[in-house]
Amino acid sequence: MAGVKIQSHKKRRQFVHLITSVDHYWGEVFEDNLFYDLNYSDLFTRMWLESEEPFRKTDLYQFMPKVSQRTAAKYIQIAIDRGLLLERPDTEDRRSKRITIADDLKIRIERFLDYSIDVFNKGLK
């Protein structure tokens, strides 16, 4: 592990507490235990990062690399059904759908990110 600084036990414990705090806050932001899942975290935050244009539904599967495409499709559909993702017809290909982040989801993700940044800024000094 070249280039990796060995940290003290105290610093490692501190870091675990910070991660745990951030993890719990994700659950608070979404209130629904259904979305308290790393696959949703991967999907939502990666969509937020790359949300310049609407996504093709099938393109979203790559944002959940730890599950099969079939499972990813189910996860995406649940988020659509709950109103966190918005599905619209693709104007270029009527057989396809385009997916965007709902404003409410964007607000939740940004609230989570703001909290996380604050926790790590304060906790890693």
Image (cartoon, rainbow, N blue to C red):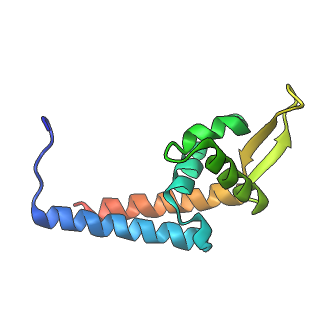
Measuring from the top left, give residue 6's x and y in whole percent.
Answer: 10, 50
Residue occupying the point 56% across, 42% down: 63
Measuring from the top left, give residue 96's x and y in whole percent.
Answer: 82, 34
Measuring from the top left, give residue 100's x and y in whole percent.
Answer: 73, 45
Left or right position of 94 against 59? right
Q: How many marks?
A: 0
Left or right position of 115 against 45? left
Residue occupying the point 33% across, 60% down: 120
Quadrant, the N terminus = top left
The front one of 62 and 53 is: 62
The front one of 114 and 76 is: 76
Q: Is residue 49 something one can see in this rendering?
A: no
Query: Compared to 64, does 91 lie above or below?
Result: above
The quadrant in which residue 51 appears is top right
Left or right position of 114 against 124? right
Q: Is residue 116 something one can see in this rendering?
A: yes
